[in-house]
Image: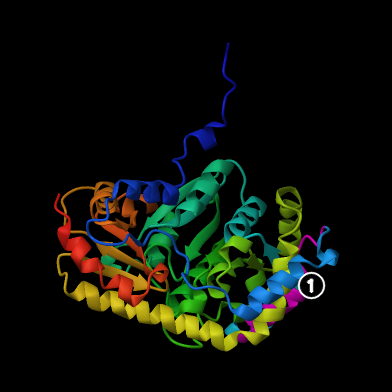
Amino acid sequence: MLAAPINPSVRSLSQPPIPLVQSWSAAYRGDLGPLLDLSQAVPNFTPHPGLMGLLGDCAANPALFGYGPIEGEPSLREAYAASVAQTYLARIDSKHIHITSGCNQAFLATMIAIAGHGDNVLMCNPCYFNHHTSLSMLGVDVNFVRCVAENKFLPQVEDIRAALSDKTRALILTSPNNPTGAVYPAELLRAIFQLCQELGVWLVLDETYRDFLAAPGQQPHDLFAERDWENNMVQLYSFSKSFCIPGHRLGAVTASHRMVMEISKVMDNLQICAPRAAQVAVSQAMPLLFQWREDNRQEIQHRSDALLRIMEDLPEWRVVALGAYFAFVEHPFGTDSVAVAKALAERCGVTCLPGEFFGDGNHRYLRFAFANVDGAALSELPVKLRHLVL
């Protein structure tokens, strides 16, 4: 009897990285205190009570039980468009917005609209692994531009130009970056975007962590003011981090009306519409939670500062890049990062992601996602790291 085959583009993928890493901690006996989870990029504080109340009310509203507009609830599209316009000092309205069920879905729907089997997409290495695996499942070829610690894990424009080909449909960037935390300067983004315009390539810019830039009220870039930006740019966003609701799965695309309509074709086959109750609740909460969101940004910055201070006392462990939720840390061992991360979880009670999960050549690094732990918990990190001997 023959077993039915699995799609080789899926079968060849590794298991989801975060559950794998968290499973390693099952062997930890607690000798060095409580487990310190630096594996997943998720805030460890609860949503605002007002937002939780709105979520409850909307979940019980029979009017939201049916299907909604594919592009998203008008109230959230309008509220988020106003937020984008204010953040980037740009003319953005609801026709530019498509709401999705999380930012991973925003990315997948966008890439299905842009690239097909045999097309080429350019990414930076290190890269967010879900971006890479999504493209692999679609049969889209991926080329990489190597980013190095000496350049703060930022790409060089000339390297991007050299890597682009006539088959390249899109360049994918993430800023602040996952996994390195590197923040792309506005002038670098402008130069890259102008190159994409010159060559007729889409720039897909994932700004999931843009609400956690170090400077309050910082304008991340001015690309929405660029001439004809709609012809070459798609921006992605997640409500999960800023509103502390990853379980409710809300993301957004900002693009031309033409691209929004193309993405709606994809979404009609993926999910039809994002969760309606969460959309309406967030649309009502957005104008009310500005200070609460700013307080959360400041708290994440405090944790970032605390981690830097702690790591200064561990010179053999070097923070090579940091920003938003992440630190990319060079470990002191002459072995691969998977072995180091596994030993940290099993022996020391620290879960983090190996650099190798984010692309070839990153065996010297670990990703610490510090937004999940407060300063008091982070203070336990030196004891745990010093204990590790390989």
- How are the residues colored? rainbow
Secondary-structure class at tag 1 = helix
Residue range highlighted in magenta: 67-86
Up-down relation of residue 378 to residue 273 (above or below): below
Quadrant for residue 188, please give it.
bottom left
Left or right, residue 40 beside residue 238: left
Q: Residue furthest top?
A: 1
Q: Is residue 81 magenta?
A: yes
Image point (69%, 71%), residue name:
55
Dominant secondary structure of the magenta stretch? helix
Residue kind at label 1, given as amino acid type: Pro
Query: What is the x, y in percent for residue 358?
Result: 38, 53
Image point (37%, 69%), residue name:
370
The residue beneath circle 1 is: 74
In the rendered picture of this protein, how many numbered marks are placed on residues? Answer: 1
Up-down relation of residue 134 to residue 81 (above or below): above
Query: What is the x, y in percent for residue 7?
Result: 57, 32
Which image quadrant: the N terminus?
A: top right
Image point (17%, 69%), residue name:
314
Q: Is residue 80 magenta?
A: yes
Q: Nearer the viewer, residue 105 or 299?
A: 299
Image point (43%, 67%), residue name:
177
Up-down relation of residue 22 to residue 147 (above or below): above
Left or right, residue 311 beside residue 91: left
